[in-house]
Amino acid sequence: MNINEICANPKKHSMNVASLGGPVLDSPVKGQSFLDENSRISLATEISQIESLKHKTIPSLEVAGPHKKLFHDPAQTRVAIVTCGGLCPGLNNVIKGLVEVLSYDYGVRMIFGIRYGYMGLNPRYGLTAMHLTPETVDNIHESGGTMLGSSRGNQDPKVMVDTLSMQLNVNILFCVGGDGTLRGAQEIIKEITKRKAPISVVCIPKTIDNDLNLLDRTFGFETCVQSASEIIKSAHVEANGIPNGIGLVKVMGRDSGFIAAHASLASSVTNFCIIPEVPLALDGEHGLLKALDRRFFKYRKDHVVMVVAEGAGQDLFSAAAAKDASGNVLKHDIGHFLVDKISEYFKKSGKEVNIKYIDPSYIIRSIPANSSDAIFCFQLAENAVHAAMAGKTSVVVGSFKGAFVLVPLEYVISERKKIDTESALWHAVIGSTRQNSYFFDNSYENELPGRSAGMDYLSGEKTRL
Amino acid sequence: MNINEICANPKKHSMNVASLGGPVLDSPVKGQSFLDENSRISLATEISQIESLKHKTIPSLEVAGPHKKLFHDPAQTRVAIVTCGGLCPGLNNVIKGLVEVLSYDYGVRMIFGIRYGYMGLNPRYGLTAMHLTPETVDNIHESGGTMLGSSRGNQDPKVMVDTLSMQLNVNILFCVGGDGTLRGAQEIIKEITKRKAPISVVCIPKTIDNDLNLLDRTFGFETCVQSASEIIKSAHVEANGIPNGIGLVKVMGRDSGFIAAHASLASSVTNFCIIPEVPLALDGEHGLLKALDRRFFKYRKDHVVMVVAEGAGQDLFSAAAAKDASGNVLKHDIGHFLVDKISEYFKKSGKEVNIKYIDPSYIIRSIPANSSDAIFCFQLAENAVHAAMAGKTSVVVGSFKGAFVLVPLEYVISERKKIDTESALWHAVIGSTRQNSYFFDNSYENELPGRSAGMDYLSGEKTRL
Amino acid sequence: MNINEICANPKKHSMNVASLGGPVLDSPVKGQSFLDENSRISLATEISQIESLKHKTIPSLEVAGPHKKLFHDPAQTRVAIVTCGGLCPGLNNVIKGLVEVLSYDYGVRMIFGIRYGYMGLNPRYGLTAMHLTPETVDNIHESGGTMLGSSRGNQDPKVMVDTLSMQLNVNILFCVGGDGTLRGAQEIIKEITKRKAPISVVCIPKTIDNDLNLLDRTFGFETCVQSASEIIKSAHVEANGIPNGIGLVKVMGRDSGFIAAHASLASSVTNFCIIPEVPLALDGEHGLLKALDRRFFKYRKDHVVMVVAEGAGQDLFSAAAAKDASGNVLKHDIGHFLVDKISEYFKKSGKEVNIKYIDPSYIIRSIPANSSDAIFCFQLAENAVHAAMAGKTSVVVGSFKGAFVLVPLEYVISERKKIDTESALWHAVIGSTRQNSYFFDNSYENELPGRSAGMDYLSGEKTRL
Amino acid sequence: MNINEICANPKKHSMNVASLGGPVLDSPVKGQSFLDENSRISLATEISQIESLKHKTIPSLEVAGPHKKLFHDPAQTRVAIVTCGGLCPGLNNVIKGLVEVLSYDYGVRMIFGIRYGYMGLNPRYGLTAMHLTPETVDNIHESGGTMLGSSRGNQDPKVMVDTLSMQLNVNILFCVGGDGTLRGAQEIIKEITKRKAPISVVCIPKTIDNDLNLLDRTFGFETCVQSASEIIKSAHVEANGIPNGIGLVKVMGRDSGFIAAHASLASSVTNFCIIPEVPLALDGEHGLLKALDRRFFKYRKDHVVMVVAEGAGQDLFSAAAAKDASGNVLKHDIGHFLVDKISEYFKKSGKEVNIKYIDPSYIIRSIPANSSDAIFCFQLAENAVHAAMAGKTSVVVGSFKGAFVLVPLEYVISERKKIDTESALWHAVIGSTRQNSYFFDNSYENELPGRSAGMDYLSGEKTRL
């Protein structure tokens, strides 16, 4: 069952612990229109799509926002916040936003920060939860990372629910994390459901790769792209600083090339953008090595900037890959692999190229959120609190076509978004890098008068672009 | 006739100089799916809205993208690019994008950069157009401003069309600019139409205030918000550095408070955000002066950060306002006005406050585009070129709900977007600043135990937040 | 008596409260060589100067560093830190450094942060001192300003010494501030001396203008120059963005043009740098107005970037100037004055220029210290602690020719440093701006072939540089 | 013969091609005092040192500046500029400065930019020199790297001098580069001398490690430190984001730890700074592994930030090291080595630590110069031009105790500066990191009441600092 089918048959309401019975109160939120509870956003946006659905249910997503009626009584509400997985710009903004909206909009006073991801819900690590107030979170948004700490991997859901319900006695849990974290949240919800405990679990998805299904943006992504594009600039400087220089940058992107593509486009100096979605051939007439050869020695460019997503070209490796504590497949190191293969190729050809390899690793992700992500994080936090206070559970807060929506947890986990290589995004990358001119030997310089090809190594004038 | 009505009865196709007859050629664009010519995006996105339109025409906008058939023959095409009005981050990216897409995707060779806005189309200023190539624009995106220069005000359309058609002999004109520029473009199009000249005029709207009708984003806005939020941080530091410090920042926003609102939210340290959409009262129980008084002397906060949009509080001035060369109303200086009024009020009350006023003026706008705007500019440029090469004219390229669209020029000019004070955006600002607690004297601290009010000037501990 | 004379007859030791008698202990400082107590740095550095002094006392300054013997017993030591005057990058680094060195090197536990400058030493304001520990200061260096707050103006020295000796019971006071602050410190020391109290007062001088006598660097200056040079870049962009654009930036510099000169040089795009040390003539053949006229209309440059120090051209105003709470003369607003005069001049001449005026005010100074200033602040703090623990009093810690020195308080206050207009610094500014070519009409372009002068307004090609 | 001995017996004048006979002209430089030709700066600055030399020659260096008399006639002067070796912030500023001072101060018109280091002086690579003018270099300072390109390794001096004297016909050569480059320059000078050619060779030393003998600063160093300290911040965020996190950053520093030391001090979050000057022991009671163990499991800190210079700990490797094209010894990879050893140690101990390793490599050095370096580069360029125009040759321009000096080429090459581990700099690093507390188990926390040691893994509260 694919996403469109799922969304075409939505549960009228997302899961709500109110179904367990209990108090329903008026919201204290002031100054904003309350949500129409039936409000849903169409997944279809093109007129022709919509027309074709005129007699069917149009697939749609539930709109997020402040609810007129609460399930959880603010005066009694106790909240836990946990951040899991790899760091991502904006984690602290989300924490700060949650604490501020809970405190100022709803008057909630008991908010716990769980230390080091799900580990902090397992008593055997002896990690004491922090008491969070607007004061303690006042300046955290100025630092990268998460003030709570994080960790990979899950813990026994029974143990975690014991901690939540018996030790901390919370009725709301906010989970901020990626795939593994959301799967962990599902386990927690199952255990909660089994116990018929009136605990809401609301998730804010974190993936630096911006590859979540249905959602058009995940927090931190823009900040990472900004940061990666600065580093590509460095690679450009290095590549220009040496004869036949190749500046090679490896960026995050395990299964999708969104960071590589956006950062290439943003920097506007990338010549080759290599992503997991496009199979990478090294050898042959249309392989990367021949493309580099053409660029340097046929079209006489004086440098190459290449950006490669960490998940690209994995089928070039023969060995099987290991996994990390979150269950993510550990990728083979495509960066050093390319350095070796390119060096070897040109050495054999008796041509000199100089490779400058940059692996910025954590540098890209451990910075504070830029202003756009900061705003986005605050709005995610706001909507997560609104949903939780109304009793919603097993939902993910996200953005779809610019609107904030609540998506059932299972929809988001089901599959990952990838770059559509026929999309405007990828075309823009192809247009900006012009890499296909070199892969397929049809550079527009062919037709430019006055540039003779076939000159010897390094002799003659080279061109920059 | 309002926008929805307009869009519900759209011309099936936007204006196209192809209607004058002439060649139709195959597009040389490679590697991207061509546009379905009938593709349109629904203005309605909520299911209930869509349902209610089931038997009517759903208002919609034409999708932008590469057309299979061109009207202008790339080999013969001569293009002019003009940038007008105040500077805005991303102008150089747009210019670079236009030149690259024209050159690389279509093979167009004759591209002219018009100097200093519409002045450059009037021979009496003796400004020679620049010949633009990928080489000349290669690094311009690293600088703010526009490599072509800009100016305010229009020129005689007859003179301009003479220059375009007789001197430069162009068949495509790209206009990048704001309201005044778009109105100037309309005059040019009228003159072109009168002459039945097959010249396409495609506009890329520029408004640092992000207040264009129908379009959800204008280029440069995010960069300005980032820059403004850094300056708000400075105001925060200054306000904290002195007893009862008020850090007051004036930001752009002639008729709408988008920059003020977003920058306040992004910085997360703003205590009062004053925008044109919310009437400003100084005096009275719910006026700004009393609100400041409460914050300092009742709730014992030790500082205030206030962000004011330049167009706010204009009705507090008695004199009539002047206009600039573009016909924009020149706003009264609300910044210094507030400094004076606040000083006066507290002086009278015998209470000391210290105001640090910052007017960053051009600092905010004269920087290079950040990565998100850089990408957006490239995509606007791409779609503008696609539209122009297909013969489209009198259209504006923009983004709606994340999709690139072509909007008839007259729709965009008709009215300006403002902040909806019942929207999630404004609520987020109110939530983040908590300014209403002070305007309406219902700060949550009321209920906090252990903080006694009514202490003398500066005695007792103050709190930061 | 001038500085050289003073330093040629130095007291063999700086003032030391040890002269009052009392304990002398071994220093607990580990891992660094202790200071030779007689170590002094020569003020003369040129061989010929030194030779000429062979038979006289060579003027010199006392070297700073860790002393083998302490006067204050760390276990009993109570310390107060006060920051006064306008904000300056690095204040928080100095505070952090003082706290860390006191805590970690000496084991001092009782450190008080005085709130809001000398006001915090006057009980009538009811400001409670903060208890400072390495924990409370751990992240303050990441923010601009001072965590303690600051204020201008002095308080009654008797009241302040009462607070220090009776209420806080401290034996060391660190004063961080400018001229006014140092004079305040002198008053405090007089009162302390009168009471024969064994309290050390050590000052760390703060002047954003870098204009202290004898000292070759004051903290925060480099950071401000970096920040100002970014803003000059903005002015450059604005000036280039409009016909005959003038980007005018006012920077700090009340009596000296160090910020203006360094920022002009650093940005390398400034065309006119106007400082207090060089008298400013507006009118006449060698006046500024004629120089601008020449640059635009004789030498056909298309823009001007002008940087003006706030203290420049003050004799052009007729009215007398007011003073601020620290006793500093408030300067007339040279920025707006120039805008008016230039506008008027060109209006009269029937020539169009467009002025973009930027007054960055506090933006330049309220940022965190850059890495070079951060290091410098830590080293100032280290040496201030070493001096204070040894019982030194009435001394200022500073840097001379790259070495850290202790200077008697009265030397530093006696006069202010100014830019020597025959120095390499000013020559570099003149060389980089080439402003004299326009003031004195001898632009090297005179001799360049192929550029005809005397063309009409805006016609013909203009040149950028 | 050591440096002091060398400088105590200086040649009265540095080498000058004027000795070959030829024209001597008046300098056209305006607005700056000319240099006293005998002006020299004392190497001794302490009074006691100076006193002890009263009857000997005081070691000294020649002061740089504009000479009244020129050897090279500006109208006939042809200049070549070459940049060699690894990139360094400020290279473009130096090039721009040289071109501007030559053009504007002296009116020199023929300036050649040699491509890709000394390769560009060997015709077999077919690299055409660029003609440099103020226009072509106007914006290069905004980019990192060198507009001319660079390369490692020398070329045959005969071939290079042939190119200089016969093909380009230059009489001045500026060499910007490191050790290898200066040695190459020496070879060129030897060949020039042999031919009695009146060609001046003036060097501007480039070493990112700031480790040149006699000179207290080399350009680009401050910029790199700023950049490295930002990356240390990232490591801090990562280390804090995971249980028992270790953020390990490798920075440049082949033989000296200046970057590591300054960046550690500037960031103020480094806990261990490992430099080549301090022997590194891994094992044993005072080894690094035990120190880490103590910090985490005895003193219960929750993270470690470690900065290691690439040249540190080389004696821990058994294999011999290779060399690069410049003859520099290639260092063993201490970064990955430490990652392996630390992981192994804690695995064996059954304790969990999480290492986040960052190797920023070229990111640190490929950025534009900050304002302080920009000014410094301009002043180096100015003084290099002054020296060259006066006929000086075989000299290096540098800064000593804040003054610009000319140092004979051979003095600079003779040995490298290292961090004196008894200096205030290293003490400041030790004070700021407090690493010796962990190496020698005497953390001040020993004495702090209320913190019990010996708790189990991760249980109990951890402290941040």
Image (cartoon, coloured by chain):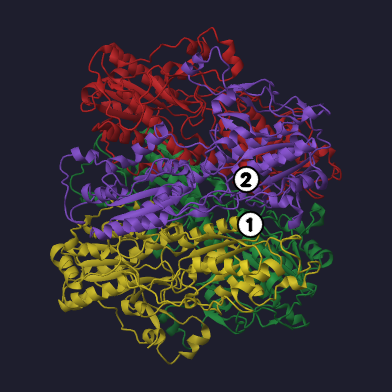
Chain colours: A green, B yellow, C purple, D red
Q: Nearer the viewer, residue A188 or C274?
A: C274
Q: Secondary structure at mark 1?
A: helix
Q: Quadrant of the N terminus of chain A?
A: bottom right
Q: Is residue A152 left or right of residue B219?
A: right
Q: CA distance from mark 2 to mark 1?
A: 13 Å
- Residue C175, percent across and down? 67, 42
Q: Nearer the viewer, residue A304 or C197?
A: C197
Residue D66 placement: quadrant: top left
Decide if residue A355 is in sight here: yes
Residue furthest toward the top? D55
Residue furthest toward the bottom? B55
- Residue D394, percent across and down? 37, 18
Q: Secondary structure at mark 2?
A: helix
Q: Is residue D268 above or below residue D217?
A: below
Q: Nearer the viewer, residue B292 or D310?
A: B292
In the picture of the structure, the residue carrying the numbered disc 1 is B240
- Residue A213, percent across and down? 54, 67
Dot 2 falls on which chain? C
Q: Is residue B464 left or right of residue C422?
A: right
How crowded pointer 2 is (Cα within 10 Å; few <14, some 14-19, many 20+) is rated as many
Dot 1 falls on which chain? B
Contact flag, marks 2 and 1 (Cβ < 8 Å): no
In the picture of the structure, the residue carrying the numbered disc 2 is C91
Residue D288 placement: quadrant: top right
- Residue C43, percent across and down? 55, 24
| Residue C57, numbered label | none
Looking at the rendered structure, the kind of residue marked 2 is Leu
How crowded pointer 1 is (Cα within 10 Å; few <14, some 14-19, many 20+) is rated as many
Looking at the rendered structure, the kind of residue marked 1 is Asn
Decide if residue A178 is in sight here: no
Residue B185 placement: quadrant: bottom left
Q: Is residue D30 above or below residue B140?
A: above
